[in-house]
């Protein structure tokens, strides 16, 4: 405003006055309990980098601890939620200026008072048992109730659950008998505000198994024991160190459980292991006896032909006859036929001439039980080529679900980067540059909880929004000692994609084997039964085990898909892009698959003749073609 003042016979003075700006101010309660949420209203701040926090009253000017930026300056009040410190005493709420030395613009005294909690539970529980704990307490955000050890070097908590779940909560007692303490922890500073003594009693168990089993055969194990959540029965080599396990089954399945004997003969032990510490409660000795086998086929065959192969062997689940170049690594396979199809089996011969081997491979370990030499000779005609293409890799209505392994092994490094970070970069690029926006998309992640078989649907099926997916992927973290529930994750896909009307593409990205007792092969078969238009592609990342690769290949083939092996960042990016492409297979008049490949990639070789070409796991109409020597035949879907 302008004020004009007239002084008699002297002079005129003009004064200019601006409207007054409110000084910075704080409003909050005068008292709060330790660890609680304190609501603070700020007015009058004029810099978005001004900040507000709670500090000890005696803290020097310019000093600060936890704080929040004002971010929205102006006269309009801003409300902040601050967390009270874990120690009682006299404090101040301070609004501090953005620039050093961070002057105090406003202050308000705050008295932090102590608070207590009570715990009510049985005085004694069995080792590993689940029991209820009733509690009273402040129930602040992140407060939790846990079981801790007693002693100078003791862990403050072993197992716990959050108070926000209500009272009572359920806790699992430690596996090791002894004296413990129930404790109520504040989320701030892990301050203990309530305790109760807890005695954990001992438990016992027994296991009973056949004294001798045949290699590769399934057998039953009777057991008695506490049957606490995730207790399990395992079969290990005799002399294996404590807390180690191999093939296993959870006791929750009841008694007896069924395990499959290893393919390698020797002395073994059945063990009852507890869920938390893998303590052995009971053992029983088992001798796995050796098996033998043989394969017999023609000494020579024409490239691209089919031959009968006679075999002898245990015919265990998924045992198979395969043909490979001489000297091929054990645990690998080429064209194959399962022994369950009969004797002899009909085996397709490769089209490349040379020295080969017929092998009887065991289905569990891919170990070679028997082998016989065979020579492949060129026929009178040379092969032709087939190139297949599709108009769109992901037509409208088709859905894509990615299953990401975030278990502890993904923390290992390739060069300077962790595997999980390479995987996140690859997925972000795939969803932002390769997959069309709006594609029905889902993301499932496993391996983010220590010693857990958890699997989570992080992104339920929804039209692809690349920015939202990138944000979710960027927040992912792996955890050491997290487990690998491949089978359980694949089982969930049926529900994840239940609403899909078109085709379904599932891509599993993993760097390790199943460690949660799941049956991935059975889950894939179930998924196929739920909809014929389904493909399961598996991308193995940094896999250096030929037998594991062979298993992944068999799983993906059973799921109308393909297996891709990636050794580094560039390989993973390429593998994920290839996994988006539909696969195709070439079938002869006898119904044998003579070749398979990816659409839009390299051509495949077949001997001249008439064939049917079909897309794997898709509803496109198969096409009949005639392949001529040294010519390329093109198929478009």
Image (cartoon, rainbow, N blue to C red):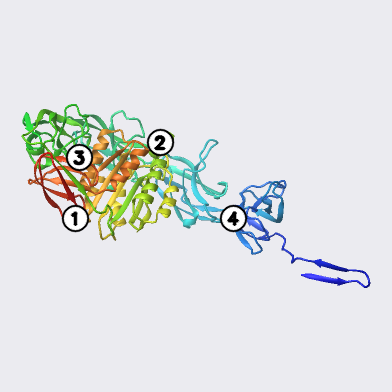
Tell me the quarter of the picture where residue 282 sits.
Answer: top left
Q: Secondary structure at mark 3?
A: strand
Q: Along the polypeptide, which appears first: circle 4 or circle 3?
A: 4
Where does label 2 land, which residue?
Answer: 412
Q: Nearer the viewer, mark 4 or mark 3?
A: 4
Q: Is residue 315 above or below residue 531?
A: above
C-alpha distance separating marks 2 and 3: 35 Å
The single residue placed furthest to the right in the displayed view is: 9
Q: CA distance from mark 2 to mark 1?
A: 41 Å
Nearer to me, 335 or 296: 335
Quadrant assignment for the N terminus: bottom right
Disc 2/disc 4 C-alpha distance (Å): 39 Å
**Mark 1 vs mark 3, CA separation in Å:** 40 Å
* 137 over 277 or under it: above or below: below
Residue behind mark 4: 36
Q: Are marks 2 and 4 in contact (CB under 8 Å)?
A: no
Which of the numbered marks, if any, corresponds to residue 218? 3
């Amino acid at each position: 405003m302008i004020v004009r003042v007239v002084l008699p016979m002297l002079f005129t003075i003009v004064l200019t006055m601006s409207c007054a700006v409110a000084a910075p101010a704080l409003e909050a309660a005068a008292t709060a309990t330790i660890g609680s949420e304190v609501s603070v209203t700020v007015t009058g701040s004029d810099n978005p980098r001004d900040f507000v926090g709670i500090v000890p009253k005696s803290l020097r000017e310019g000093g600060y601890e936890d704080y929040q930026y004002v971010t929205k300056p102006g006269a309009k009040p801003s409300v902040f939620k601050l967390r009270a410190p874990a120690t009682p005493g006299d404090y101040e709420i301070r609004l501090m200026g953005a620039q050093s030395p961070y002057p105090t613009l406003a202050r308000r005294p705050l008295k932090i008072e102590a608070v207590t909690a009570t715990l009510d539970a049985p005085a004694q529980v069995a080792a590993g048992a689940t029991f209820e704990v009733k509690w009273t307490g402040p129930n602040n955000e992140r407060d939790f109730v846990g079981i801790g050890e007693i002693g100078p070097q003791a862990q403050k908590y072993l197992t716990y659950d959050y108070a926000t779940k209500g009272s009572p909560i359920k806790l699992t007692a430690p596996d090791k008998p002894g004296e413990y303490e129930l404790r109520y922890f504040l989320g701030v500073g892990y301050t203990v505000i309530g305790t109760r003594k807890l005695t954990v009693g001992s438990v016992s168990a027994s296991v009973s198994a056949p004294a001798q089993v045949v290699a590769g055969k399934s057998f039953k194990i009777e057991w008695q024991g506490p049957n606490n959540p995730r207790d399990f029965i395992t079969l290990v080599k005799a002399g294996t160190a404590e807390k180690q396990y191999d093939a296993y089954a959870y006791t929750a399945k009841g008694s007896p459980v069924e395990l499959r004997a290893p393919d390698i003969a020797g002395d073994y032990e059945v063990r009852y292991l507890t869920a938390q510490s893998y303590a052995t409660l009971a053992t029983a000795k088992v001798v796995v006896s050796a098996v033998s086998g043989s394969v017999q086929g023609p000494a020579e065959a024409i490239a691209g032909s089919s031959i009968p192969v006679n075999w002898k062997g245990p015919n265990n689940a998924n045992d198979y006859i395969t043909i490979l170049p001489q000297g091929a690594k054990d645990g690998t396979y080429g064209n194959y036929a399962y022994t369950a199809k009969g004797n002899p089996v009909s085996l397709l011969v490769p089209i490349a001439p040379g020295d080969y081997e017929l092998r009887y491979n065991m289905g569990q370990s891919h170990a070679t039980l028997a082998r016989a030499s065979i020579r492949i000779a060129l026929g009178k005609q040379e092969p032709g080529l087939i190139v297949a293409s599709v108009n769109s890799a992901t037509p409208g209505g088709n859905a894509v679900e990615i299953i990401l392994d975030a278990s502890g092994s993904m923390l290992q490094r390739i060069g300077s980067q962790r595997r999980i970070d390479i995987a996140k970069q690859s997925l972000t690029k795939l969803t932002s540059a390769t997959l069309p926006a709006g594609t029905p998309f889902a993301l499932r992640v496993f391996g983010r909880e220590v010693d857990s078989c958890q699997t989570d649907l992080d992104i339920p099926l929804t039209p692809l929004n690349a920015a939202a997916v990138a944000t979710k992927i960027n927040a992912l973290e792996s955890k050491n000692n997290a487990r690998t529930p491949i089978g359980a994750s694949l089982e969930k896909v049926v529900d994840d994609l239940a609403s899909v009307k078109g085709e379904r593409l599932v891509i599993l990205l993993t760097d390790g084997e199943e460690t949660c007792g799941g049956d991935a092969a059975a889950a894939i078969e179930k998924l196929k039964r739920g909809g014929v238009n389904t493909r399961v592609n598996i991308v193995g990342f940094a896999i250096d085990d030929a037998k594991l690769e062979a298993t992944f290949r068999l799983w993906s083939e059973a799921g109308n898909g393909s297996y891709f092996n990636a050794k580094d960042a560039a390989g993973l990016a390429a593998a994920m892009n290839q996994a988006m492409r539909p696969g195709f297979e070439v079938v002869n008049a006898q119904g044998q698959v003579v070749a398979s490949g990816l659409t839009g990639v390299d051509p495949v070789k077949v001997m001249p003749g008439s064939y049917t070409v079909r897309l794997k796991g898709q509803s496109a109409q198969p096409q009949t073609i005639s392949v001529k020597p040294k010519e390329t035949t093109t198929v478009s879907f």
